[in-house]
Image (cartoon, helix red, strand yellow):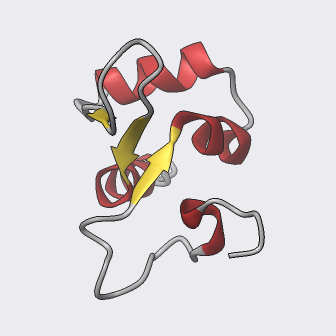
Amino acid sequence: MSGKKAADSYSPEGPPDEGDRLAVSLKTLTERLDASRSSVRRWLQEAGIRPIAMSNGSKGAIRYHWREVQAWLQSRETVQ
């Protein structure tokens, strides 16, 4: 890929055969939602979306399952 992260190069639906394995970073979510890291982290926690540790240690990468995030975002799109 040309310098872009995997989650950034997919449409919101994600690839049909890899959708369950696709993970998105907190940074990507903060950019897409135009919100702070702490707000997005809190929203995900309140929604019950658990982070995935991609590696061990304090510098390990944290990602979220895109399908879970996508379902949460779609549930928030309803206008009341």
Q: Position of residue 80 (x, y in %)?
A: 48, 45
Q: Nearer the viewer, residue 67 or 25?
A: 25
Count of numbered marks: 0
Can you say which quadrant of the picture contains the N terminus? bottom right
Q: Position of residue 9 (x, y in %)?
A: 64, 72
Examine the rendered structure and indicate whether residue 48 appears above or below residue 39.
below
Examine the rendered structure and indicate whether residue 79 appears above or below residue 60.
below
Question: Can I make out residue 27 in this image?
Answer: yes
Q: Residue at x 56, y 18 (%)?
A: 39
Q: Say whether residue 13 is left or right of residue 5.
A: left
The quadrant where residue 53 appears: top left
Q: Say whether residue 79 is left or right of residue 20.
A: right
Examine the rendered structure and indicate whether residue 22 appears above or below residue 26.
below
Question: Can I make out residue 80 in this image?
Answer: no
Q: Nearer the viewer, residue 52 or 71?
A: 52
Q: Residue at x 44, y 46 (%)?
A: 76
Examine the rendered structure and indicate whether residue 20 appears above or below residue 25.
below
Q: Position of residue 60 (x, y in %)?
A: 41, 26
Q: Residue at x 22, y 30 (%)?
A: 48
The quadrant where residue 50 appears: top left
Direction bottom: furthest residue = 16
Q: Say whether residue 28 is left or right of residue 19.
A: right
